[in-house]
Image (cartoon, helix red, strand yellow):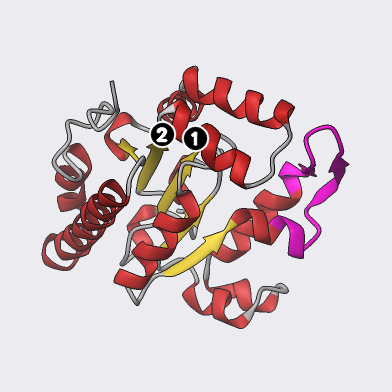
Amino acid sequence: MPPTSRATRTKPNILITGTPGTGKTTLAGLVTSALPDYQLLEVGKVVAQRNLHCGRDESFDTLILDEDLLLDEMELILGGDDAGGRGVEPQHAARGGSGGWVVDYHSSDLFPERWFDMVIVLRSSTSILNDRLVMRSYSEKKISENIMCEIMDVSFNEALEAYHPSRVLSLPSDSIEEMSDNVSRVVEWAEAWEQSMSTHGVEARIHVDIDPIGGDGDGSGAMD
């Protein structure tokens, strides 16, 4: 069984994804603050800091991801007990394959399904998303591309194709109140996952997966 198998984890790994501007980094930071034993992994920062790219796409003002390098790096971070001997920072290696990662990235379908126990897809109305991207000084072309991705539900559809629907939940992220509710729901689910593991072992997590945080596992948290 691979070192990143779900059977070896004592805490769940959570992926927070969505179109740029939907609040992924904010939610991930708030969740890790509420769950002090968990650790935040911002994939974009890892790509930039460890040069896991092939240069810059000037038209979109973004780095061109080297997927193979990123996956190798994240396997070390999310992987087994020997990670510390392979160039991984001590705080990352210490976590090993025990879980407790909150990962923030705008895409989900390039990661192996076995890495994550829950995938949160954040969604925003196009008007609010547009305002947020303008505040980031995105180019008109980049804003248009991201707005179209949100209209077409690209992030949500990617997640449903890459992961079992029972692990995927779509949540609205237009307001401070919604963000607060989302933090509470994710924290509640993570604590339930840990409790089921400590009490009943791996088998109990099947039940937690079916109804992770009060949804029906098919994206019932999605906005109309």
91 left or right of 217 in image: right
Whether residue 179 is visible to the viewer of this picture, yes or no, is yes
Screen quadrant of the C terminus = top left
Q: Residues within 10 Å of mark 2 (few under 14, many from 20)?
A: many
Choose between 137 and 50: the one closer to the eye. 137
Name the residue beneath numbered marker 1.
129
In the current view of this chain or complex, which residue is farthest to the top? 152
Q: Is residue 79 above or below residue 72?
A: below
Q: Indicate the amino acid at tag 1.
A: Leu
Q: Which mark is residue 35?
A: none
- Looking at marks 2 and 1 on the same chain, the residue that comes earlier in the sequence is marked by 2
Q: Which residues are magenta?
A: 47-68
Where residue 45 sits: x, y (%)?
66, 60
Residues tagged 2 and 1 counted as in contact (Cβ below 8 A): yes
Q: Indicate the amino acid at tag 2.
A: Ser
Residue 65 lies in the magenta stretch? yes
- Give how far apart the Cα atoms at labels 2 and 1 are: 6 Å
Where residue 222 sits: x, y (%)?
29, 28
Secondary element under disc 2, as helix, strand or loop, is loop
Q: Quadrant of residue 98?
A: bottom left
Where residue 50 sits: x, y (%)?
77, 63
Residue placed at 16% from the left, 59% from the top?
Answer: 192
Residue placed at 64% from the left, 24% from the top?
Answer: 144
Name the residue beneath numbered marker 2.
124
Choose between 161 and 114: the one closer to the eye. 161
Q: Quadrant of residue 13?
A: bottom left
Secondary element under disc 1, as helix, strand or loop, is helix
Residue 28 lies in the magenta stretch? no
5 left or right of 85 in image: left
